[in-house]
Image: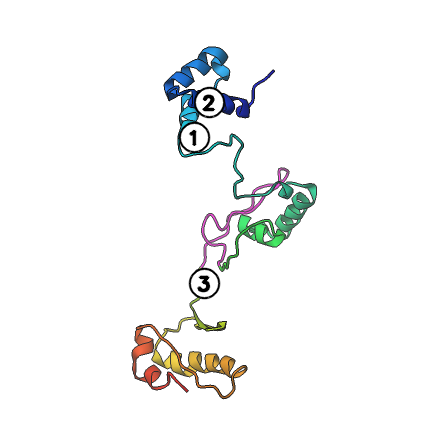
Amino acid sequence: MELNREHFRAIIFHNFRRGLSRQECFDELNSLYSDKAPSYSTVKNWYNEFNRGRCSIQDESRAGRPKSVVVPEKINAVRELIKQDRHVTYREIEASLDISDESWIYAYEPETKQQSTVWVFQDEAKPTKVVRGRSTSKQMIACFFGINGHVATVALEQRRTVNSEWYTTICLPEVIGEIRKKQKNRRIILHHDNASSHTSTHPSGGSST
């Protein structure tokens, strides 16, 4: 009978319970099974696991890609995504096909060498590398939260700076407008950090309405 990993783990566990040292266990396995025996590092790792109280020799469940991902339907869907956009990334594919356990937000242009990489099928020629242009991938936003959760998100316009004028004339009116949609007459109190745009004369004068 061909021994598999779990068989060897059972033998290692038996030797551990017998009181053999790591080296003695390895030497015994090596003398009996020669090149098919597990390595010393494997024996050492399992001794460490057993010393920590582990009794199971089964593989523990691990996070990552589920087996249901590698099915013809998913494979064909991935091919279609690649055909539609040769710059599509692994994360975009995962998000589109719901095969990831992450929630994320992305914003970028295919400018760097890695970002300009495209998918190429076996019978296709490599395309010319995309010329790097001016990056516009960064976007500063201000997020506001209340006791019931998210209230509003205000994006800073391109080439503008966050200062008291922008905060009081653009940002706050939008936030207050969102709050007033649900709470028309209730007094609003804003809690700020100590950023300069929040502690200057304008914001402190209009923090509560």
Amino acid tagged 1: Phe
Q: Position of residue 160 (x, y in %)?
A: 39, 73
Front one among 10 and 197: 10
Residue 158 spot, x, y in % from top left: 43, 71
How far apart are the alpha carbons under marks 3 and 1?
53 Å
Measured from the top left, where is residue 135 in percent x and y? 44, 60
Q: Which of the two residues, 101 or 168, is positioned nearer the viewer here?
A: 101
Which label is found at residue 50?
A: 1
Residue occupying the point 54% across, 39% down = 61
Q: Secondary structure at mark 3?
A: loop
Residue 47 against residue 208 in the figure, above or below: above
Q: Which residues are magenta?
A: 108-133
Residue tagged 2: 12
At 47% from the left and 24% from the top, the residue drawn is: 13
Task: Give the number of the mark in front: 3 or 1.
Answer: 1
Please name the residue that numbered disc 3 is placed on.
Answer: 136
Viewport quadrant of the C terminus: bottom left
Specify few, some or many for label 2: CA neighbours under 10 Å numbering under 14, 14-19, or 20 or more.
Answer: many
Give me the C-alpha separation between circle 3 and circle 2: 57 Å
